[in-house]
Amino acid sequence: MTEPTPTATGHWIDGAVVPVTGTMTVRNPATGEIVARVPAGTADDVDRAVTAARAAFPGWAAIAPAERAAVVRRVGAGLRARGEEIAEAITAEMGAPISLSRSAQVGFPVLVAESFAALAEDFAWTEQLGNSLVVREPIGVVGAITPWNFPLQQIMSKLAPALIAGNTMVFKPSEVAPLTARILAEVTAEAGLPAGVFNVVYGTGPVVGEAISAHPGIDMISFTGSTRAGRRISAVAAGTVKRVALELGGKGASLILDDADLPRAVEKGVMMAFANGGQVCGAWPRMLVPASRHDEVVRLAVAAVAQYTVGEPTDETTRIGPMASEAHREKVDGYIARGIADGAELVHGGPGRPAGLERGAYVRPTIFANVDPRSVIAQEEIFGPVLTIIPYRDEDEAVEIANGTPYGLTSGVFGEPEHALSVARRLRAGQVDVNSGQWNPLAPFGGYKQSGNGREFGRYGLEEFLETKSIQR
């Protein structure tokens, strides 16, 4: 593996690198070593980026949607061409196993760019409604703020539809995983995106994130991250009454029915709990099982988790790397200790680092059984490789438990297809998979309750970045 992406020496504003003096360190969570230094942005940097974005907006909005889509398609091709560089950067900055970085961290953003570009060809930009012409137009300048768990995927889910809609953007990447932001900026320039349409300002949430959220020159905020941060962004953005789209936390459930293919359901449920080290908002960290089959499910889950090897993320065989930072490792480890203290039955893993991994932000993949659905580990988002197995008496109780958290982002149901579908309809979640339904980039993704508002992907994601005007004739 080659050296990770070099230090980002400045923000990307108006199509060029803007030198700065203050910097922040980026550490490899597997070793604790510094892998890069990136700018520590200020409110003045945000103001410069907004000025550039506003100046570029009229020209970009005037370009035909098909031409804007062609640029996005070229961005996707550029990301694919630099795929190995991107994968290595993400593995270095947030610890995703290199195999996952290549397949998902790079593969998903490319697929998102391609799917949105294709969607633009048939999208109803205008509609005749009686004597009214309904016109869909770009909002203006979009402020995008993204997390560290899928650093390139999260921004492409916003950038692709925002650009096709005709908007310009000011983007703040996570300070934990900022390295791919520069690569993306370079790719957009090579794809022919005009200067000022896409701008990157590095920095922390309390400084740069707040400045973006409050700025009167920004017309919309699109945020992915924690529910706590989403509340703060909503409060700050309210001062200028801008649109706010939020994709927040989750506490998904894999609900296994009596008539499910049990081994297949457990295998899929474990995968959806431990993928990316459990650092996925759409993960299923709760497994709901018939009480009569609880012990059988536990045996299957413990056997399945043995395949999830923890190790150095550059190793091709590693399934779970370190948590994204030492601070996050401590948080996840604290939840594991809390589960034990609250009386959950520990059947695999436990607190502390895995044997042989005394350095780095590693945790032990952990399974709790006979978990009280009201307990802390069953209610709060842990965002780590921790699975809670919860028994239920009947189907109504299963649905009640599945819906019984503050979140409502994703879940899965396993059982006879029509039976599982009927239960899926009862779940208060924005996306429900039935028997491992395949991910569809044209289907909407987003949450109920404290998992956020708005939708990503497909025409639903494109509509998030559009205003609607009616012209009476």
Image (cartoon, helix red, strand yellow):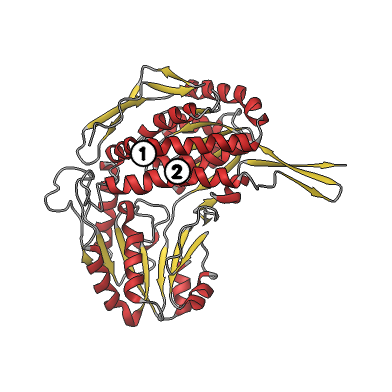
Query: Considering depth in this image, is 345 or 338 the residue closer to the camera?
Result: 345
Most extreme residue toward the bottom, as rendered?
Answer: 292
Label 2: few (<14), some or many (≥20) within 10 Å? many
Residue under label 1: 83
Q: What amino acid is labelled 2 in the image? A: Val
Q: Residue at x 35, y 65 (%)?
A: 268
Is residue 376 in view? no
Q: What amino acid is labelled 1 in the image? A: Gly
- Give how far across and how far down residue 127 sits, in percent: 76, 47
- Give how far across and how far down residue 51 sits, in percent: 57, 21
Instruction: Indicate the quadrant containing the C terminus: top left, top right, bottom left or bottom right.
Output: top right
Residue under label 2: 110
Q: Residue at x 56, y 36 (%)?
A: 70
Q: In the image, is residue 116 above or below residue 413?
A: above
In the rendered structure, the answer to whether residue 287 lies left or right of residue 46 reads: left
Quarter residue 415 falls in: bottom left
Instruction: Indicate the quadrant containing the N terminus: top left, top right, bottom left or bottom right.
Output: top left
Mark 1 or mark 2: name the one nearer the start of the chain. Answer: 1
Q: Residue at x 35, y 37 (%)?
A: 86
- Give how far across and how far down residue 182 sits, in percent: 40, 29
Quarter residue 84 falls in: top left
Q: Are marks 1 and 2 in contact (CB under 8 Å)?
A: yes
